[in-house]
Image (cartoon, rainbow, N blue to C red):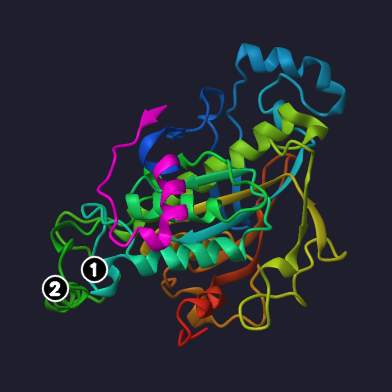
């Protein structure tokens, strides 16, 4: 557990008092859970690339407590042998990715990266409120956020609008931070482009001095996604038919919540050749940053061969999300000899919720 440093208050709080009370409680004043790495008995799991895709290889050693808890479940597929913990287990969970709301730096097209910890602007809060209203019927079982203030405030604001999980704690994780831009942080985006051109490169491949390469950011995204998969598998095995921290078992889900003609794939979404109504073991909300989320989604598409709606244009798939843009994926993991993630995209960078705060927004 960590104490989150209190940040300076935001102007014009009167119009946003209810939202700010929520974020101050959830992000600025109380202790917040922070996941920094998988549980000790999960740390030897790792992904391996192959011609047939990416798999999660064995190497798991159960700790004594977990092994003893699972002894009675051996007949159902959970044993104490190496990786026997996950034998016969199938997990399906949703991942909802949301970019933080607008800051003053976003509006002025200045790079923030990790060194500029700027709070949301008034418009940023309005955007986060709109995203929260769009998501207010979604039952999230886990909530994760970057530990930068703009992401924390966005996550808290979204939860403040929720009918299903208003009191959820926000789990902070430094792996979800924005790409580090080194000497370019605090400078105009145009200056970064000028630097890239002088170096004979193009954005975003160019790395300014002190910044992170695309591969380094991808490694963070990959590591965090593996953690989510490990968390889901471990909790499913421990919880059995009780589901994952849902209180009432599995999470009922319909794809039409996120899909639309322009942003998703209600006609294409069919993970089990059945209906769009499925049951999930978990539903995970992740609030992060534009460049980081773009690289994460590209990892899904290029490395893990994520299934994409036929209605989705490639330009939208690989573009930087607008502030509070929403992307949604269904991940299916089955434990046989290997774990092969099957990822289905429902929508990428959906932002039609912004029409209520930005009537001229291009959606």
Looking at the image, which is closer to me, 40 or 288? 288
* Disc 2 from disc 1: Cα separation: 8 Å
Crowd band around label 1 with a 10 angstrom C-alpha radius: few (<14), some (14–19), many (20+): many
Label 2: which secondary element: helix
**Looking at the image, residue 88 lies above or below residue 9:** above
| Residue at 56% across, 23% down | 41
What segment is highlighted magenta in the picture? 1-25
| Residue at 57% across, 53% down | 50
Label 1: which secondary element: loop
Q: Which label's residue is closer to the chain start, 2 or 1?
A: 2
| Residue at 65% across, 83% down | 311
Image-quadrant location for residue 306 = bottom right
> Residue 73 at what x, y percent from top left?
82, 22
Crowd band around label 2 with a 10 angstrom C-alpha radius: few (<14), some (14–19), many (20+): some
| Residue topped by disc 2 | 195
> Is residue 91 visible to us here?
yes
- 70 inside magenta stretch: no
Q: Are marks 2 and 1 in contact (CB under 8 Å)?
A: yes
Residue 167 bears which disc, if any? none
């Amino acid at each position: 557990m960590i104490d989150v440093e209190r940040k300076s208050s935001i102007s014009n709080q009167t119009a946003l008092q209810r939202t700010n009370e929520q974020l101050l409680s959830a992000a600025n004043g109380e202790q917040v859970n922070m996941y920094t790495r998988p549980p000790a008995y999960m740390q030897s799991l790792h992904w391996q690339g192959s011609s047939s895709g990416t798999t999660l290889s064995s190497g798991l050693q159960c700790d004594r407590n977990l092994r003893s808890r699972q002894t009675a479940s051996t007949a159902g597929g959970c044993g104490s042998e190496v990786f026997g913990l996950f034998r016969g287990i199938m997990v399906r969970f949703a991942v909802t990715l949301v970019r933080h709301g607008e800051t003053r730096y976003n509006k002025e097209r200045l790079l923030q990266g990790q060194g500029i910890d700027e709070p949301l602007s008034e418009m940023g809060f309005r955007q986060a409120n709109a995203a929260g209203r769009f998501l207010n019927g979604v039952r999230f079982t886990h909530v994760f956020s970057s530990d930068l203030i703009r992401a924390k405030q966005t996550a808290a604001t979204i939860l403040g609008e929720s009918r299903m999980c208003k009191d959820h704690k926000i789990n902070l994780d430094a792996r979800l931070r924005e790409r580090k831009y080194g000497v370019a942080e605090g400078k105009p985006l145009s200056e970064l482009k000028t630097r890239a051109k002088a170096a004979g490169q193009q954005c975003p491949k160019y790395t300014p001095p002190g910044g992170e390469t695309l591969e380094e950011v991808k490694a963070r995204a990959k590591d965090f996604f593996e953690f989510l998969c490990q968390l889901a598998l471990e909790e499913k095995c421990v919880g059995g038919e009780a589901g994952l921290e849902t209180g009432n078992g599995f999470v009922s889900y319909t794809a039409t919540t996120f899909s639309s003609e322009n942003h998703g794939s209600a006609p294409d979404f069919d993970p089990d050749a059945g209906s769009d109504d499925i049951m999930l073991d978990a539903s995970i909300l992740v609030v992060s940053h534009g460049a980081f989320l773009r690289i994460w989604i590209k990892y899904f598409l290029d490395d893990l061969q994520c299934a994409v709606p036929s209605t989705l244009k490639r330009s939208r798939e690989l573009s930087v999300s607008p502030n509070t843009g929403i992307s949604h994926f269904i991940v299916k993991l089955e434990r046989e000899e290997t774990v092969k993630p099957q990822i289905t995209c429902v929508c990428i960078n959906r932002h039609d919720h912004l029409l209520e705060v930005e009537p001229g927004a291009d959606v």
